[in-house]
Image (cartoon, rainbow, N blue to C red):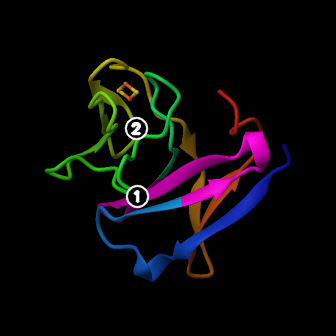
Amino acid sequence: MQTSRIVVCKADSLREKQTVKFAFGAGKERKEGFVVALAGNLYAYRNECRHIPMTMDWVENRFLSRDHRHIQCATHGALYEIAGGLCVSGPPTGQHLHALPVSIENGEVVVTIGDGQDQD
Ligand code: FES
């Protein structure tokens, strides 16, 4: 897969602990990711639990736990830290979500996909 840039949203539209989903790849290689803002930082992860490789949001774009302190997998309730993606509760405890490089370029939130980031 070649490196690609995905413009996710306008940077000034992303509020604290808001998540925004995006898709990348095509056909059978299509995957999802999401960006989340926390304390002035941006994090981007593949939308794929480390317990079973399935998407984590049963409700579209709902990734955070009720208290908004963690990213939560809807299937078995695994909790991941927003900053860094470490699983702190649930079947994949100790594993990290697949992080993706994210930056702000010209006022837009940009995720870079490539170099095997679409793979395990
Ligand atoms: S699939 Fe996510 S905790 Fe089991």
Please tell me in which quadrant of the rendered image residue 73 appears. Answer: top left
Residue 54 x/y as whole percent? 50, 33
- Is label 2 in contact with label 1 (beta carbons under 8 Å)? no
74 to 89, vertically: above or below: below
How many numbered discs, if any? 2
Majority secondary structure in the magenta region: strand
Instruction: Inspect the magenta stretch and tell me whether residue 38 lies in it.
Output: yes
Query: In the displayed image of the protein, which residue is found farthest to the right?
Result: 2
Residue 111 to residue 11: above or below? above
Q: Gap between marks 2 and 1, in whole Å?
A: 17 Å
Specify start and end residues of the magenta stretch as a single range: 22-43
Q: Amino acid at mark 2?
A: Gly
Asked whether 98 or 28 is in front, the reply is: 28
Q: Quadrant of ligand 1?
A: top left
The image position of residue 102, as x and y in percent, is 57, 57
Q: Which residue is mark 2?
A: 85
Q: Quadrant of the C terminus?
A: top right
Is residue 22 or residue 5 the one in the foreground? 22
